[in-house]
Image (cartoon, rainbow, N blue to C red):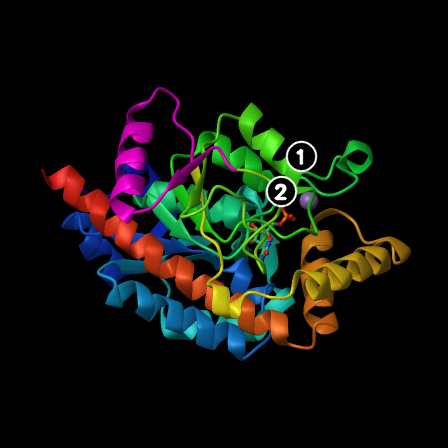
């Protein structure tokens, strides 16, 4: 019989839809909430969050959007809770691993990043997670030491993260080096190259290419059997028709980085600032691409979760 570890139940609330999927060992896909509160403007954030959940259902899996509400860790949110996080936007705490015990002990709200979504997904028994982009090693990290906790979490929590690569607001070469050091497999889905979120190419190669959800599911199963298994990063390129002109997006990124430096933006404010600036500078085009790639990742994650469940039933 499947179920949630009693120790975690003290802190974790699982929605009825997710609870029945856990019980019956059906496919599930975790979704993050920082993308809702900090990653997109209202109301597109709420529309996208609900739409992505439906795409996951249509592809045979149960969506579990993850957040912290009133100090409770939540796997599976109601429509009202998604609306609440979307309206609150950046007023909600962007919750990384170090924020969780504080938010829980004080009964506060938090929007989960890739890091904390992986952590809570693991507590709820969910092994596949779909998002847009992950955090990584920032440009200039050799001086600032700004390296996203997402990379650390990928090294220690056995969840497969399906993303569209990383934005070149980061140093993609150093991000790949860091993932190698930390033992995280980086898989290109249908590509040998790390996609750069808005564009399908980055100029950096990935470790391996895989072409089907079944291949990804087999990889996940083996990884979870390894000692001290960490996560897996799947980089799924944005569909051609929604990808952006590299010259346009790179110009916006350079300008956003320049302004961030001028304004002295640092720490956890850095990524949300850069994302918002890029959006502003590309006049909404990047928002459309962002929405499309998240939907694309949700579909692949759901198919992979379904294939993973089928493997475990055999
Ligand atoms: N990159 C994106 N979109 C995002 C984020 C990153 O392209 O929404 C969010 C994710 O929640 C990610 C977090 O986990 O930012 C990373 O923040 P930081 O760089 O502060 O670790
Ligand atoms: Mn950081």
Residue in the image at 28% along x and 40% along y: 215
Q: Is residue 219 magenta?
A: yes
Is 235 on the left or on the right of 276, as rendered? Answer: left
- CA gap between label 1 and label 2 equals 8 Å
Q: Which mark is residue 136?
A: 2
Tell me whether circle 1 and circle 2 mark residues in contact (CB < 8 Å). Answer: yes
Tell me where residue 269 appears, x and y as whole percent.
Answer: 72, 54
Residue for point 23% across, 54% down: 19
Instruction: Note whether 9 is above or below 69 in the view shown.
Output: above
- Per the rendered image, the range of residues in magenta is 206-231
Which numbered circle lies on residue 22?
Answer: none
Which residue, as the protein is rendered here, is positioned at the far top?
Answer: 227
Residue 208 visible (yes or no): yes
- Residue at image mark 1: 174
Under circle 2, the secondary element is: loop
Q: Give coordinates of residue 180: x percent, y percent.
A: 55, 27
Q: Earlier in the sequence, mark 1 or mark 2?
A: 2
Please state if 195 lies on the left or on the right of 222 as rendered: right
Q: Position of residue 76 (x, y in %)?
A: 34, 60
For residue 16, side relative to residue 93 (left or right): left
Q: Is residue 83 visible?
A: no
**Which residue is farthest bottom?**
43
At 39% from the left and 50% from the top, the residue drawn is: 129
Q: Nearer the viewer, mark 1 or mark 2?
A: 1
């Amino acid at each position: 019989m499947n179920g949630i570890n009693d120790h975690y139940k003290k802190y974790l609330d699982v929605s009825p839809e997710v609870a029945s999927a856990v019980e019956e060992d059906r496919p599930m896909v975790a979704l993050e909430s920082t993308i809702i509160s900090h990653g997109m403007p209202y109301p597109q954030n709420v529309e996208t969050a609900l739409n992505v959940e439906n795409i996951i259902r249509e592809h045979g899996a149960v969506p579990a959007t993850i957040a912290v509400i009133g100090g409770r860790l939540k796997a599976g949110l109601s429509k009202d809770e998604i609306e609440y996080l979307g309206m609150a936007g950046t007023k909600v705490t962007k919750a990384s691993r170090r924020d969780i015990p504080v938010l829980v002990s004080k009964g506060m709200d938090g929007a989960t990043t890739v890091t904390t979504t992986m952590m809570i997904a693991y507590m709820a028994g969910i092994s596949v997670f779909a998002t847009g982009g992950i955090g990584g090693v920032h440009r200039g990290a050799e001086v600032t030491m700004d390296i996203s906790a997402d990379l650390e979490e990928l090294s220690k929590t056995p969840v497969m993260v399906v993303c569209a690569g990383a934005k070149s607001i980061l140093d993609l070469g150093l991000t790949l080096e860091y993932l190698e050091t930390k033992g995280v497999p980086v898989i290109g889905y249908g590509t040998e190259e790390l996609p750069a979120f808005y564009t399908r190419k980055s100029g950096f190669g990935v470790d391996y290419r895989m072409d089907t959800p079944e291949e990804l599911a087999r990889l996940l199963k083996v990884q979870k059997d390894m000692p001290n298994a960490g996560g897996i990063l799947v980089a799924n390129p944005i569909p051609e028709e929604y990808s952006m002109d590299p010259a346009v997006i790179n110009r916006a990124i350079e300008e956003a980085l320049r302004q961030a430096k001028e304004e002295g933006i640092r720490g956890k404010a850095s990524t949300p600032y850069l994302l918002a600036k890029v959006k502003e500078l590309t006049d909404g085009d990047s928002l459309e691409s962002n929405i499309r790639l998240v939907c694309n990742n949700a579909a692949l994650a759901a198919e992979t979760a379904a294939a993973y469940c089928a493997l475990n039933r055999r």
